[in-house]
Amino acid sequence: MPFVRFTGFDKNVVESVAPAIVEDMAAIANIPQEIVKIELLHVEKITNSPQSVEIFMFPREQEKHDAIAKMIDGHLRNLGFTRTHIFYVLLQPSLYYKEGLPLNEIPRKTVHEA
């Protein structure tokens, strides 16, 4: 956790950019690289939908959210993707569960920041 989910991209594009995004996101958010999850969503478009990146994570300072979005946009622009929509779905520790317990009830030493 966090989850970075790509929609409308080819798998090879996501695979090529994933290592840099993981490294940069971990540095910006001050989290271990191994908890950053990259996923490619396969959706069936019914109407015209843009390529997008959804970022599911816990709230941080606005500057960090801005820096992460800018970083992802920069990596995608370098590959020729100039119109990608990037947005956050902010999670709450009280509503995120592991083994049936909300994160805010699990002792801190066993929980990584998401």
Image (cartoon, rainbow, N blue to C red):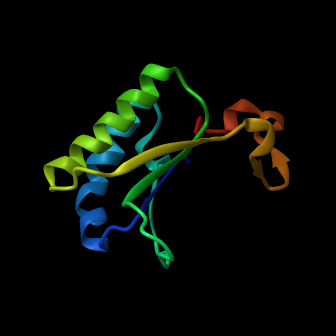
Image quarter (top left, top right, bottom left or bottom right) of the C terminus: top right
Q: Quadrant of residue 49?
A: bottom left
Residue sitting at x 36%, y 28%: 67
Q: Is residue 67 above or below residue 20?
A: above
Residue sitting at x 45%, y 30%: 65
Nearest the camera: 50 or 16?
A: 50
Q: Quadrant of residue 24?
A: top left
Q: Position of residue 96 (x, y in %)?
A: 74, 46
Count the numbered circles shown.
Answer: 0
Residue sitting at x 25%, y 65%: 13
Q: Position of residue 47 (x, y in %)?
A: 48, 72
Q: As drawn, is 10 to the left or to the right of 54?
A: left
Q: Is residue 59 above or below residue 18?
A: above
Outermost residue toward the front in this view: 47
Nearest the camera: 3 or 84?
A: 84
Q: Position of residue 16 (x, y in %)?
A: 22, 62
Q: As drawn, is 20 to the left or to the right of 48?
A: left
Nearest the camera: 51 or 29?
A: 51
Q: Position of residue 110 (x, y in %)?
A: 69, 39
